[in-house]
Amino acid sequence: MEDIVQVENISYSYVQKHCALSDISFSVKKGEIFSIIGSNGCGKSTLLHLISGLLFPDSGKISFKGDAITEDSLKDQAFNSYFRESIGYVFQNSDNQLFCPTVLGELIFGPLQMGKTSDIAMERAEAVMKMLNIDCLRDRPTYMLSGGEKKRVAIGSILTMNPDVLLIDEPMSGLDPKNRSFLIELIFQLNEAGKTIILTTHHLELVDHFQSRVAVLSEQHRIERIGNAEEILADTDLLIKTNLIQEHLHRHGNISHKHLPSNFLFHRH
Amino acid sequence: MSNALPLFLQTNEEHSKKSSVKKRHSLSFIDRTLKSIAELIKIVYFQSDTASRRGLLQQVDARVKSIFLFFFILIISLNRQISSQFFISAFFFVLIISSGVNLAFIYKKVVVLSFFFGFLVVAPAALNFITDGEIILNIVHFKKDLSFWIYHVPSVIGVTKEGCLVVLGFYMKVANSLTLTLMIVYTTPFNEIIKSLRLFRVPAMFLLVITLTYKFIFILAQTTEETYFAMKSRWWRNTRESQMDKIVAGRITHIFRKSWIKYEEIYRAMSARGYTGAVNISYSQKIKYPDIAFLVFFLAIGVLCYFI
């Protein structure tokens, strides 16, 4: 499989002061699910901002299908259109992602920008609304939605563009179990349909569900390890070191004791 | 929820990166505005960064710095000697260097603002029909003097030496006041500046409102930045103006509603911690001896500047 996204030795600092990423390198193959995991503040969201060409690295290079993504290359309107059509980004905070007055407006915005006709844009919006069960919200202003509804609309607004690559920042944040299960199934289906998925999370259950290739970011903003889900989840020392698991105190009857979380380590059928 | 993917999502579209016209995309007005609002975050980061360094002024108590600020503003305003203004400038320059604040950052702002508010506004005062004196540069030459009503225009209009000194003096006053204010702002954490205003009997409720406003502006800037990114990630062609209007209107409503929700949440959080209408801001930290020494030193320099 060809590499669709290549990240080579990138570093990024906020205000040229606070290091967010340091010497990060990896590549993502076409059609795979790739997870970026790490504790809070390790630079996961910044990394997705860089891959989607919203921020630009201080050093290093990011390529999409072999083309360098730089501030200059994205000033070329044709290349910018091609790149934005190809990569869809679902933000962690859906509230800030939704900027159109209504849900329907949000869903048709992308296809219209791509130059699709209003009919096609509407057709796509209807299909996505039906799939995500948000057709009852079509004329509702986005600020009047609940957290879960906002997340679904945010995902829908990207899906109507039908991008090749989906960047999903913390997909499970703010979702109830029903929405979580639905979203996991949706990600599987999109991946089976040929979409490349790059997601960030600090929920190890998700890594276990997808059994994807995983990049572990350390609290020092570096790549600590890249490997498959099974070997990463089996490396307890690595997970403790990167602050992805910690001992927790709990009770059994009258007895309190501490141990590491076991739900994903002993996942059995 | 139906789990079946719509047909269009089951196919991968061919996206072309070729275009017959090689167009360069430039930032629109709204794009630029949103970006500049987002830049506010950088300024806040910069301020908190310089205020937390271990420089000379950073170690001085905020209350002492507030007295220093108001005292020197008074000295700068009352003093008419240009030599004193130059002495004050040199003193501030030394303080900025010893506090480790980026000189270019402060003086860039000072030069630009002083040019508009300290030079352009009083520039006509350099001319001989406003400030009488020895002409050092002729501008216009009429055949004879012109007089009408209470006005008198001399036959030669030019820049006078005395006029230049008036303009220079005013420019120095504005530049020094700005340098002083920026120097204090960039070496003192925002919350300390606000707390120190209690010294001047500013009502606690007023200070609380300023603190909340500052915090809210920061949150607003973060929200705006993220929204800007979200727009940029889906907005790769020039959007039609009518559509743009709708988006901007939507964002204004969104921000207004968000502000309202935040206001209610903050009020509840304050009530939950015992707020009943009266605000008590304590300043538990005591002024130390080095702070008093600094205060005496600053006041002495100020008096010296006044009498130079």
Image (tube, coloured by chain):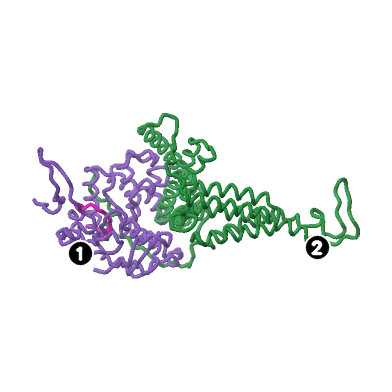
Residue under the point 63% across and 51% down: B303
* Amino acid on which disc 1 is placed: Gly
- Camera sees residue B247: no
User: Where's the C terminus of chain B, which quadrant?
Assistant: bottom right
Residue under the point 28% across and 51% down: A171
Which chain is disc 1 placed on? A
The residue wearing badge 2 is B139
Q: Which chain is green?
A: B
* Amino acid on which disc 2 is placed: Ile
Left or right of residue B62: residue B306: right
Disc 2 versus disc 1: nearer the observer: 2
Residue A79: mark: none
The residue wearing badge 1 is A227
Give the magenta-colored segment's residue range: A192-206
Rate crowding at label 1 as few (under 14), some (14 to 19) or many (20 or more) other CA atoms within 10 Å. few
The colour of chain A is purple
Above/below status of B118 relative to A66:
above
Compare residues B63 and B24 and report the one nearer the observer: B63
Residue under the point 64% across and 55% down: B305
Q: How many numbered marks does the figure carry?
A: 2
